[in-house]
Each structure stands twice: as C-alpha cells, then as structure tokens.
Image (cartoon, grey):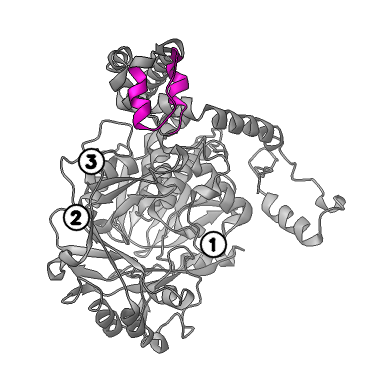
C-alpha cells in the first residue's frame, strides 16, 4: 500500500509543514502523517506570526527557502513593525493573520510541492532496527518504511486539556491526544517530562463595544516577511486594546479554588513569558490592570482572540470576569480558554542537527523539544527536515552558528542548555543581534540555502542585485557632499548643528535622528540617485552606514569566538582531568557532548553564555 519514503514527518503543525517542505524541496520523497487533514498548519493559539525576535526568525526561515513568510504575507490582515523607536537590531515585523486563509494557503503550497504525500492517521509507534529509525506504525496498523523520521507532535503527546475542575484527553480543542510514542521512546532510554501551555477564550466580535477600547491600526506602509514578491493586502483590519481592572481581578480570584493550576492538578511548567491571567494577578498583585489585545481572527469572521487573557479557570468565572472588562459588557463566548499539559523530551538529547543521540535518523522539532510559539517550531522543522534529507542522502549536516542566525541561537540554546519551561526566543538571547537583524536575513542566509538547493535562482538573483544596489548607494554617499545652503534647513528642523562647509553625505547620515530619505528631499543630487534603488536596498545602505562601528565590533567578536567554536572536542576527551571543573559540571558537559556525527567526533562546541 505504501512505498518506502526517504523521510516521514509526523504531525502537520508549523514544524511539520516546514520539515516536509524542506526535505521534499531538497529532493527527498516525503510522507506527512497527520491525525486530521483539515487542521494542517492550524493556528492553535493567536492568529499572528512574528513579533519581538520571532519576526527575525520568520525572515530567516524565508531566506532559507521555507514557506512561513510567504504564507504569512498572503494571509495577513494587518502589518506592524515593532520597536521602531529603538535601533534596527530590535526592529521586529509582526503580522495579524486570517487564521483560515493561513491554513488553507499552507495546505495549497504543500499540495503543490513535488515529493510530498499525505496520510491521515495517528502514529502510535516507530519502527526501530539496529538503533535506527526505519519508519512508523499507525493506529490502523500500517507499517510505513522510511530512511528517516521527523517527530513534530506539538502538544498532542498524552495531551490533557484542563478547564476548571474538568479535564479530558486532547491535543487541541476538539482533537484527541496522541498515545504510544512517549512510552516507546522512554522504553528506549529517552528522558521525557511535562509542560503546560494555555489559550484564551474565543468570543463573538459582534457582542463588543469597540468605542470603549483603544484602536491599534497597522502601519501605513504595509511590509511583510518574505523576500519574494508576495501578494499583500491593500487595506488592513485594526486590533483593539482594553484593560482588566481590580473588579475583574476579584472575580477571577473567586475561581482560584477550582483552578487546575493552583489546585495542583497540572504538573507541567507553563511559559514564564506568556502567563495565564490568573497567574498574572497572582504574581503581580500590585498591578491595578493588565493589557488585553482584541485581535480579529480573519477578514470574514466575527471570531475574536483575546490576547492576554489565557486561562484555565472555570467557564462561569471566565464569563463573569470578561463581562467586567471595558467593551465586553455584553460579551458572548464561542469557546472558553483552557490549559493543555503534554509530554516533551528535554532537547539536550539531540545533536545540533536535531537528530536524537540515542536513535540514528530520528529527528525532533517543535514543542516536543520544549519550545513555544509558531516561529520557534517552524525554524526547527525547517532545520530538521533539511538535516533528515542530508542524512539519508549521505550529505554534510546543515548547522547554523549563533553568529549566523537566531535559528542558530535557538538550537544551540536547546541543545547545550536544555529547558525546563517552554522556551521562547527574545532578542536578548542573541549576543550578536546587531548582525542578526530582520532586514539582512536574506544577505546572511540565501547564499547557503541556494547552494543546498532550497533557495531558487530567482531568490539568489534578488540578493545579488540587492547587494549591488547597497554597495553602489554607499559609494555615492561616501563620495558626494551636501552644501550648507541645501542641508542646513533640514538640520535646523532637527535642532542639529548647521554645517559651514561642504560635508560628505555619509557623515551627515551619522547624526542622530537624521534619515536618508529626508536628506534626499533637501539634496537634489541624492534624490535623483535614489530613484534607481528599491526601498529595501535604501534602508539597508542607511543601516550599514549608521551602525558600521557597532557592526564591525560584532564582526571582530565573532572572528575571535570562531577560533574556539571551530575546535571539535573528541568524544574520547576526559573531562575528569580538568581540575577546575566541579564534578557536576564535568558530568553535564560530558552528557551534552556525547553526540556522534558519523565521523567519530562531537558536534558540541564552546559557546558564549
């Protein structure tokens, strides 16, 4: 019934979809197995992609030939560039998505990807021979052979949903949990544990009074994630902001005695940086209010996502508390919020390729590794799918360093440090964030992706053209000058010191608050020159000039770190001989470094803390 596949991907969430696309586009014959073909790429939680540090990841996935950026752009209902008031290293794109269009577009792209087959069934076990993953066993009893398996099970492994004092098995609302895989892997020697995440109630937007809320429109200039010419909307939908209050908090507290979190019915650790509303008012009792984002789920639906009100309190408490939020006085609930507890496998059991150390050709990606967030899952899926292909085709592994991408930071953090709570990416985790900006992800990664066979010739040509435009514009700014009578009126607007003689344009650009587009309005020669460049290249040239000193410092630091990073530690190395290390440190380093790459050496590398 089934042929032998190169790669089987288990689970069709954000990690699974990217894994299947990557392996297939590299040339592997792929089977994507999901328990429900109607929920491929489902946005289980908030209907949005990107945000602080997450937006950088989506742009990196796009630069590497992944689909998430394209799908996000073509399903967006709002675009915002966050942190514009800070430096470019902190700028983070975010799109509000039409949840149904997002999933439909993902499925369409996968169905149009050669080499991807689909099958709807639950995978209850793996076929393991000679310490190697050789396929999967489904709930219907099918044994499907493959040369490699990628597990992207999300929150489905022995998932339990909690609403107040009620709990029942499930991997997502109205979907059953997956069983069998955890038990088999534990019997093979894997360590597993439990984590928790949650989601807020979904409500009827027709029942809200938006006049009592603050409108949050999108940016005037609609940007996006993908470096390709994606279709973007001509108009946007607004989000809205409202707040809880002391009375809301008091109502929520009446449900604490029935809360699964406070009653101890949930063993898993929840996400520290995305706590439930009951956790917020318990931990931050001094705060009089908490911000809520009222986010539409799409163009043609009245369903609303209440971002900031994640909860597992009883339904009646959720309802009473929401009705006391300004604008929610007549609220109708489509679905209550809930918490979900699920199995994960501490990621120190993986190599930097996301292959498991215990079983060859078995890869983990997404929440099974202890992460939270669509973006974190998508980038792991991309890398796991790529490396599964590379492994079965006997090619070199693909490993991104911390200085290459946020993806490299995320994977290295997971592999080297592990996580005991849902891991979320932040800009603060990346020590080279000035280099790892969202605006230059294509310049950093497209060439690598092109050489591997993921990025198309069109993508590579766009990057080559962008580099050429940037260098040409930088050369113009270096060689040409502004005269006092041209530029001083602009400098006066900024309360910046006037110039008394000709000055290089690049030097003027280095001044605080000076923008290249504004200089051009006062310097006709520059305005004429800039007409031949696209906006992306203009922005890139300005950033490179303004932040050249900081960029060069990080480049030097990366070079120094690389001298240590590229030293491979042999697996035979005896850490007990290092007297300066404590016994616990020796054992921990030894356990993290016992990863065989097929060459008898370890992928474990010295990384900055």
The residue at the point 18 percent across, 47 percent down is 236
- Dot placed on the residue nearer the N-terminal end, 3 or 1: 3
Q: Is residue 386 above or below residue 531?
A: below
Nearest-to-viewer mark from 2 and 1: 2
Q: Label 1 neighbourhood size at 10 Å, few (<14), some (14-19), many (20+)?
A: many
- Dot placed on the residue nearer the N-terminal end, 2 or 1: 2
Q: Is residue 322 above or below residue 184?
A: below
The quarter of the picture where residue 314 lies is bottom left
* Closer-to-camera residue (501/158): 501
- Measuring from the top left, give residue 291's x and y in whole percent: 34, 66
Q: Is residue 365 left or right of residue 103?
A: right
Real-space Cα distance between discs 2 and 3? 19 Å
Real-space Cα distance between discs 3 and 1? 43 Å
The residue at the point 42 percent across, 82 percent down is 260
Q: Is residue 494 left or right of residue 295?
A: right
Q: Label 3 neighbourhood size at 10 Å, few (<14), some (14-19), many (20+)?
A: few
The residue at the point 18 percent across, 75 percent down is 331
- Dot placed on the residue nearer the N-terminal end, 2 or 3: 3
Question: Which residue carries the number 2 mark?
Answer: 298
Q: How many marks?
A: 3
* Closer-to-camera residue (142/607): 607
Q: Is residue 348 above or below residue 454?
A: below
Look at the numbered disc 1 and give the secondary structure of its residue.
loop
Does residue 130 appear anywhere in the picture? no
**Residue 192 counted in the magenta span:** no
Residue range in magenta is 486-512
The quarter of the picture where residue 327 lies is bottom left
The quarter of the picture where residue 449 lies is top left
Question: Which residue carries the number 1 mark?
Answer: 345
Q: Is residue 584 above or below residue 56?
A: below
Does residue 550 appear anywhere in the picture? yes
């Amino acid at each position: 019934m089934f042929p032998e596949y190169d790669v089987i991907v288990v689970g069709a969430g954000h990690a699974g979809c990217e894994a299947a696309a990557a392996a297939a586009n590299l040339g592997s014959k792929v089977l994507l197995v999901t328990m429900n073909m109607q929920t491929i790429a489902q946005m289980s939680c908030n209907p949005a992609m990107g945000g602080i540090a997450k937006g950088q990841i989506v742009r990196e996935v796009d630069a590497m030939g992944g689909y998430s950026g394209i799908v996000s752009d073509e399903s967006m209902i709002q675009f915002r560039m966050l942190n514009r008031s800070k430096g470019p290293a902190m700028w983070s794109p975010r799109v509000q998505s039409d949840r149904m269009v997002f999933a439909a577009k993902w499925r369409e792209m996968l169905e149009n990807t050669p080499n991807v087959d689909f099958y709807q069934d639950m995978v209850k076990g793996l076929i393991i021979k000679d310490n190697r993953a050789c396929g999967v066993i489904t709930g219907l009893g099918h044994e499907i052979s493959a040369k490699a398996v990628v597990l992207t099970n999300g929150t489905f492994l022995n998932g339990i949903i909690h609403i107040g004092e009620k709990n029942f098995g499930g991997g997502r609302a109205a979907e059953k949990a997956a069983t069998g895989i955890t038990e088999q892997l534990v019997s093979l020697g894997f360590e597993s544990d439990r984590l928790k995440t949650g989601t807020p109630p979904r409500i009827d937007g027709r029942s809200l009074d938006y006049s009592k809320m603050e409108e949050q429109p999108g940016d005037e200039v609609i940007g996006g994630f993908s470096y390709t010419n994606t279709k973007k909307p001509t108009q946007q939908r607004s989000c809205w902001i409202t707040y809880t209050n002391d009375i809301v908090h008091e109502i929520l507290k009446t449900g604490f005695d029935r809360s699964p979190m406070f009653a101890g019915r949930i063993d898993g650790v929840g996400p520290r940086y995305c706590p439930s509303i009951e956790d917020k008012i318990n931990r931050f009792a001094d705060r009089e209010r908490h911000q809520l984002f009222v986010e539409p789920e799409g163009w043609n639906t009245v369903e609303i996502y209440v971002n900031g009100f994640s909860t597992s309190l009883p339904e009646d408490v959720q309802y009473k508390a929401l009705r006391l939020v300004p604008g929610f006085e007549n609220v109708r609930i489509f679905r209550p919020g809930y918490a979900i507890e699920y199995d994960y496998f501490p990621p120190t059991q993986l190599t930097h390729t996301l292959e498991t150390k215990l079983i060859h050709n078995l890869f983990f990606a997404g929440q099974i590794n202890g992460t939270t967030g669509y973006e974190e899952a998508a980038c792991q899926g991309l890398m796991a799918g790529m490396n599964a292909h590379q492994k079965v085709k006997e090619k070199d592994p693909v490993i991104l360093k911390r200085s290459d991408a946020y993806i490299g930071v995320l994977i290295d953090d997971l592999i080297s440090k592990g996580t005991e709570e849902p891991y979320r990416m932040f800009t603060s985790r990346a020590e080279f964030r000035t280099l790892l900006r969202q605006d230059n992800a294509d310049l950093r990664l497209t060439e690598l992706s092109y050489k591997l066979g993921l990025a198309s010739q069109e993508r590579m040509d766009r990057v080559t053209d962008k580099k050429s435009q940037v260098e040409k514009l930088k050369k113009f700014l270096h060689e040409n000058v502004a005269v006092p009578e041209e530029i001083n009126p602009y400098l006066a607007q900024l309360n910046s010191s006037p110039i008394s003689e000709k000055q290089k344009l690049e030097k003027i650009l280095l001044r605080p608050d000076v923008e290249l587009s504004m200089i051009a309005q006062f310097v006709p020669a520059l305005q004429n020159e800039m007409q031949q460049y696209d906006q992306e290249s203009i922005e890139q040239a300005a950033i490179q000039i303004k932040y050249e000193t900081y960029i060069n410092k990080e480049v030097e630091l990366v070079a120094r770190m690389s001298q240590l990073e590229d030293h491979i530690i042999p697996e035979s190395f005896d850490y007990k001989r290092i007297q300066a290390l404590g016994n616990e440190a020796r054992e921990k380093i030894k356990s993290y470094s016992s990863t065989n790459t097929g060459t008898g050496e370890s992928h474990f590398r010295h990384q900055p803390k």
